[in-house]
Image (cartoon, rainbow, N blue to C red):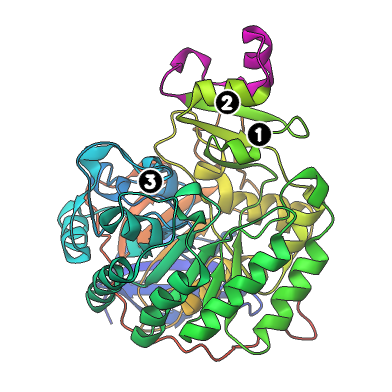
Amino acid sequence: MHFDLLIRGATVLDGTGSAPFPADVAVNGERIAAVGRLDADDATTVIEAHGRHLAPGFIDVHTHDDTNVIRTPEMRPKLSQGVTTVVVGNCGISASPVTLHDTVPDPMNLLGGVEDFRYPSFADYARAVDEAVPSVNVAALVGHTSLRSQVMDDFARPAEAAEIEAMRRSLREALDDGALGMSSGLAYRNAFHAPGAEMRALVDEVGAAGGLYTTHLRDEFAGLLDAMDEAYATARHGRAPLVISHLKCAGAGNWGNAPQALSSLEHAAQEHRVHCDCYPYTAGSSTLDLGQVTDEIAIFITWSDPHPEQARRPLADIAADWNLSLMETARRLQPAGAVYHNMSEDDMRRVLAHPLSMIGSDGLPNDPHPHPRLWGAFPRVLARYSRDLGLMPLAEAVRKMTGLSAAQFGLTDRGVIREGAYADLTLFDLTTLEDTADYARPIAAARGIELVTVNGAIAYRDGEFAKHRRGRLLRRRERLSPTPIHAMTEDSP
């Protein structure tokens, strides 16, 4: 049988968590044609992969690449670390269904300027993604704050009945057109005043369509457990699977509470389909939020509209120069971006290793000095936390960024290496794999990612990006059930 592509002699990590095994993997068209010991005599392209690991293409379940997949479709930060699919629309902010005419509400400004919000319907956004032909696949959530931006002139209050109904109609249309579900960012000031009743009304639409609900919790600090309980109740009411975004114990006073948070997650997952995502760093990054300004942690300013000359400096140093308090300095810098060193390593490792957690970078591609997770999150999990520190077996680390992610987000025939699945594949050299991006030099491609294919075509090879791109928008095809899929097993790490 003729094959378009044959990857020969790889150590295969199939995305299910099963032990690695030696095999050849053949591709015809967009899909995997065969896995096993195969004849290479009749293959158009043969890749010798002896000594290398072959995994499903990594799925970044938490991104803010909404407009970048259209404006910068090469998607170099993602392809170069082995990512073949990005989930956009997280933390309550999405590029659609939105049109804006003046200022961009915070934190929607993380996605771009006014000119980037020009998709009044999800169908318009989907069409734009397909026309751009990004190098990676795109699956999209609809953001709650983005829905609010289209019907409310004042975010600092609950939505009224007519506004909620307008948001429900817009969300329903997006779900019908293939959106995965809805996200919220209840910690941000432009969503914080949305009460439980507003959220339940919208998540009811998500559950009715068979989608999922993801949430940046209302509180990741002292009120974390209460915020988690609110998320569970909202998801249960709507009968929608739940993913808690970037689960963390933020703030020095909250360090050490990961066991309680994970116990809460496990308990909820016994009755409802609940998971979380996590990134492998102890610093977060977002817009400069006055609610997070404190002298207990290091805060690094990455950009500032009114004071661009203060970018790439610690907030404390700027405050000293200006002879102002941290809070007064932050107000003067806004709107701005910041990196917050607000987590403990032990807490982060516990969440990262938990069987219910998936990997998401939460990278900010429009930040001129981004957090290093934008370029390095996935190799960092594999190289530092699995290979070097033994936090989890390699097969489990790969499951968290492939098979588990595809299953929870309803990405049919993705995230696994098996005959008939889409040929999204990442070949890496575990001995040289390394994330090279750091806080001082965050824009740097990982080492050790040797080959990436997207929908059967080579997209990245030996540091070179292919000229022809093959990514597309992945419209929701499955109805996700809220019934729990128990990931907890006796031999789980």
Tell which circle, 2 or 3, labels the residue nearer the N-terminal end: 3
Dot 1, how many residues are within 10 Å of its Cα: few (below 14), some (14-19), or many (20+)? some
Q: Do labels 2 and 1 touch, CB within 8 Å?
A: yes
Residue type pointed to by label 2: Ala
Q: Is residue 227 magenta?
A: no
363 relative to 13 in the view: left or right: left
Who's the residue at 46% across and 24% down the image? 304
Who's the residue at 48% across and 27% down the image? 334
Q: CA distance from mark 2 to mark 1?
A: 8 Å
Residue type pointed to by label 3: Met
Q: CA distance from mark 2 to mark 3?
A: 19 Å
Residue type pointed to by label 1: Val
Q: Do labels 1 and 3 touch, CB within 8 Å?
A: no
User: Residue beneath label 1, please?
Assistant: 293
Q: Position of residue 97 (x, y in %)?
A: 24, 60
Toward the viewer: 195 or 109? 195
Dot 3, how many residues are within 10 Å of its Cα: few (below 14), some (14-19), or many (20+)? many
| Mark 3, secondary structure of its residue | helix
Which residues are drawn in magenta? 304-325
Toward the viewer: 179 or 187? 187
- Tell me where residue 51 sits by quadrant: bottom right
Toward the viewer: 408 or 165? 165
